[in-house]
Image (cartoon, coloured by chain):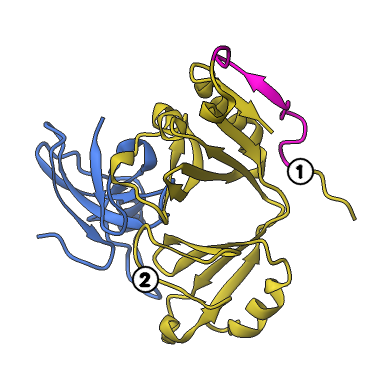
Chain colours: A yellow, B blue
Amino acid sequence: MTSISPLSNVVEKGLKGNHENKKEENLIKISEIKNLLIIQIVQYKSSTISIEDISIDNLNLKNEPLTVASNSNTRILWNGPKNWLLVSTKKNLIKNISEIFNENDFAITDLSHSRAIIELEGSEAIEVIKKGCPFNFNTLEKNNSINSTYNGITFTVDMISDNPCKIRLFALRSFGESLYHSITDASLEFGFKSS
Amino acid sequence: MLYIKCPYCGMRSQNEFAYGGDANVKRPELNEEVSDKIWDEFVYLRKSPRGKHIELWHHISGCRQWFKVQRDTTTHEIFRTAAINEDIK
């Protein structure tokens, strides 16, 4: 079955906003990321097993605010106490996850089709996020993630890289188009390349 | 705008939170006979103090945890926040 991407109706490829007389590499790059495996992992409050012994794709769960455990394929974002969001390009990881996590201790939910993902890249990307989000982004470093709001839309920010700045935004699929419009509106003054 | 220190995520804007009411309200004990008056007080009656007040807040756009906040209802100054299973004295 072919799946329709959450932003397929709104993404228009090309150069937008204040892009004239600017080099293309200096523009913000905005793109929709598709076909990722997104799994929510929640450890039940009654569970007593240690998460330090658990490894997925050679990554351990960390119960520390803001932290992201990552390798080239997979990122595990801290979402709340005993609550993580696993994002991976390895679609078959779901089989391993089902085997690793005991259903008496963990709730595993496949959210792959219920999130819209927007990736921003460029030196001004963080300025775009600051326009609509009240979080103090001066404190956010590489491999940090936060949950917050952007113009009232609840979203997750994953700082993949800080030099060059590369940020992934996750929102509920039904809010994806609104978030995309908000992000592209805020990017107009810098000029951006949509792809 | 208020800034509230979530016990789990740290200092965040009020935009990320939802107010959850008075944290001092105690539910009547389960499996015990409860008069209509006590039930009515539990469901409807709330104090509206001037000054320090302990409240429930929900970090609804963050870690989605409930926690307690001690706030001054006249100045909005926040003195302490604590996890839901901790006491604020």
Q: Quadrant of the C terminus of chain A?
A: top right
Q: Amino acid at mark 1?
A: Ser
The residue at 49%/20% (across/down) is A190
Which marked residue is nearer to the observer: mark 1 or mark 2?
A: 1
Q: CA distance from mark 1 to mark 2?
A: 55 Å
Please state the extent of the stretch shown in magenta in the rendering.
Answer: A5-21
Q: Of residues A127 and B38, which is closer to you in this image?
A: A127
Tell me which chain the residue with mark 1 is part of.
Answer: A
Of helix, strand and loop, which one carries label 2? Answer: loop
Q: Of residues A157 and B58, which is closer to you in this image?
A: A157
Of helix, strand and loop, which one carries label 1? Answer: loop
Does B13 appear above or below A89?
Answer: above
Question: Residue B23: image x %, image y %?
Answer: 25, 54
Assess whether residue A64 is covered by the magenta stretch: no
Q: Is residue A35 left or right of residue A25?
A: right
Question: What mark, if any, has residue B33 been given in the picture?
Answer: 2
Does B76 appear above or below A92?
Answer: above
Tell me which chain the residue with mark 2 is part of.
Answer: B
Mark 1 nearby-residue class (10 Å; few <14, some 14–19, many ≥20): some
Total labels: the figure holds: 2
Tag 1 and tag 2, C-beta contact below 8 Å: no
Question: What mark, if any, has residue A5 been given in the picture?
Answer: 1
The residue at 59%/26% (across/down) is A24
Q: Is residue A96 left or right of residue A83?
A: right
Question: Residue A112: image x %, image y %?
Answer: 69, 57
Question: Residue A123: image x %, image y %?
Answer: 44, 33
What secondary structure characterizes most of the magenta part? loop
